[in-house]
Image (cartoon, rainbow, N blue to C red):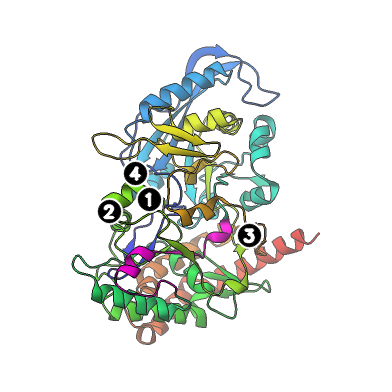
Amino acid sequence: MRRKSAYMLTAAVLSVALLAGCGNNGGNAGNSGNAGNGGSGSGTANANADGGGANTAKQDVVTIKYVIPGTEPASWKEVRDAVNKKLLADGVNVQIDEQYIDWAAWDQKLNLMLSTGADFDMFQVMNDVVSLSNYIARGAVKDISAELNEYGPNIKTAISDDIFNAVTKDGKIYGIPANWMEPAVVDLFTSNDFLLKKYGINTKVTTPQEMLDAMEQLYNKAPAPKPQFPFTLSNVSATGMDFLHRTFDSFPFDVRDGIAMINNDGTVKDWVDTDEFKQESAFFRQAYQKKLINPDVLTLKQDQVQKETEKMNWGFVMGTLANSQAQLDKDLPGAKLGDFSLQEFNPEKGHYRFTNAKNLNVVAANSKHPEAVIQFLNWLYANQDNYDLFMYGIEGKTFKKTGDNSMEPILDPKTQASLIPNADWMIGNLNFIRVGDIITATRKLYEPDNGAKNFLSSGFFFDATPVKTELGNVKAVITSDIAPIYAGVVDYDSHIAQAQQKLKAAGVDKVIAEYQKQLDTYLASAAK
């Protein structure tokens, strides 16, 4: 886990983990921070680059630059050199380097690089933060269909067609999904049973009100520093929280871009104009009024939220966390990996995959080497050894294998930070992923749910090109007027009318109509 200039709802207890994206903490330790070294360019060496594909011919060695959010891990340069050495040894004339952008500057700096035509090749997309369709509308990404067909047989084997559908528009493929998790767990949350039991609070909550009550009890009973309630609302799509969606009779439904509510009957509504939005806002308003939300909720950054989440001083966290026993010993002494449970509201309503491509990697429009990107990814998904080397690093130096599908990160002796160089949630795949010594409940994230259903729009993505101007204007209103309402900072009844007027003026009706038009086309095509 989706960047997110985050909003932290303090005190009591709920935290949004970066499943994706973003954000999610359910994967291995992600990267955070400064720009790395390296750049795109061509070398002079020649080798037999098959990249796992049958049609690859001899070519100059090409270095591709992969732009991702985070800070360069201490182990990266050594791992990068080992990866590049193995790429050449395997006959793939591609070298890779990563450029890191601090989470707080991710959107701004990436947008600047895209708008100025900076020289890089691949970058991470978190669909729940800034959607793929947004980048397509801006002409920021390439159609990689031809390259994938020629150089990507291993990619096609590792990622099924129904997942690729979520990055395909009019027969054009715009990204490689990171199929690293079971999407049907997106509306579950983790309960910190250890902390709740410590203060005599019921660990099982069945309604949002019971969750609020538990939050309030924990805040009142726990000594300073008071428990925190980190919550991310910076991106517009977060003005609709999956864990609350399950509480409505209208479930299942999906909220896209914080704007469009896609219903189970195929209709699209203005999300802000629904009773569901109003009730979810009331949940956060109550929390805010009870001082369970940080007063700076609208200005807190993701790194601040992340730090508070990692302190384990909360009662419930949205999604999952990847804390190890060593981290628990440090941050929550006495707690064990089994002292946490995965919960959901109304489990009888079943499980749904609302998107099959929450995280993905795309080829930048300015890339001079789109084929090299596909050759690298094809190499990555060719076998377990390649995946282990790039994702987890050098065995014995950055990680230890503890089983066929498990591993243990090695910690930096100076900082006690994990030396794992890359994050599964950004570029991983369930066929190869290794699960470390993590909170037991989190393991559900890596287990396919055979009973889960694909929601009718799970393979649909919205092409914003026809309403690019209106969508930009609507998102601006979402940020300035809607997010404060949804976060509970201002009262719904006193502010919603003016906010909705601004949305109308910005063109929300045109955006919703375009959503409906494209969804109708998609559903008609899917029915054939």
* SS assignment at label 4: loop
Residues shaded magenta? 183-204
Structural crowding at the residue carrying mark 2, measured as other residues with C-alpha within 10 Å and reported as few (<14), some (14–19) or many (≥20) = some
Determine contact: label 3, label 1, CB under 8 Å: no
Residue type marked 2: Asp
**Left or right: where 413 falls relative to 393:** left
Please tell me which of labels 3 and 1 falls first in the chain.
1
Q: State yes or no: residue 74 in magenta.
A: no
Determine contact: label 2, label 3, CB under 8 Å: no
Which numbered marker is on residue 243? none
* SS assignment at label 1: loop
Residue identifier under label 4 = 32
Structural crowding at the residue carrying mark 1, measured as other residues with C-alpha within 10 Å and reported as few (<14), some (14–19) or many (≥20) = many
Instruction: Point out residue 266 in the picture as x, y percentages from the top left corner.
Output: 67, 71
Residue identifier under label 2 = 331
Note whether 424 is above or below 290 in the view shown: above
Determine contact: label 2, label 1, CB under 8 Å: yes
Note whether 360 is above or below 209 in the view shown: above
In space, the residues marked 4 and 3 are separated at their CA atoms by: 29 Å
Structural crowding at the residue carrying mark 4, measured as other residues with C-alpha within 10 Å and reported as few (<14), some (14–19) or many (≥20) = some
Residue 121 appears in the rendering:
no
Q: What residue do we see at 44% from left, 22% from top?
A: 82
Name which quarter of the figure residue 98 lies in. Answer: top left
Instruction: Point out residue 8 in the picture as x, y percentages from the top left corner.
Output: 31, 65
Which numbered marker is on residue 458? 3
Residue 286 appears in the rendering:
yes
In space, the residues marked 2 and 3 are separated at their CA atoms by: 38 Å
Quadrant for the C terminus, please: bottom right
Residue identifier under label 1 = 323
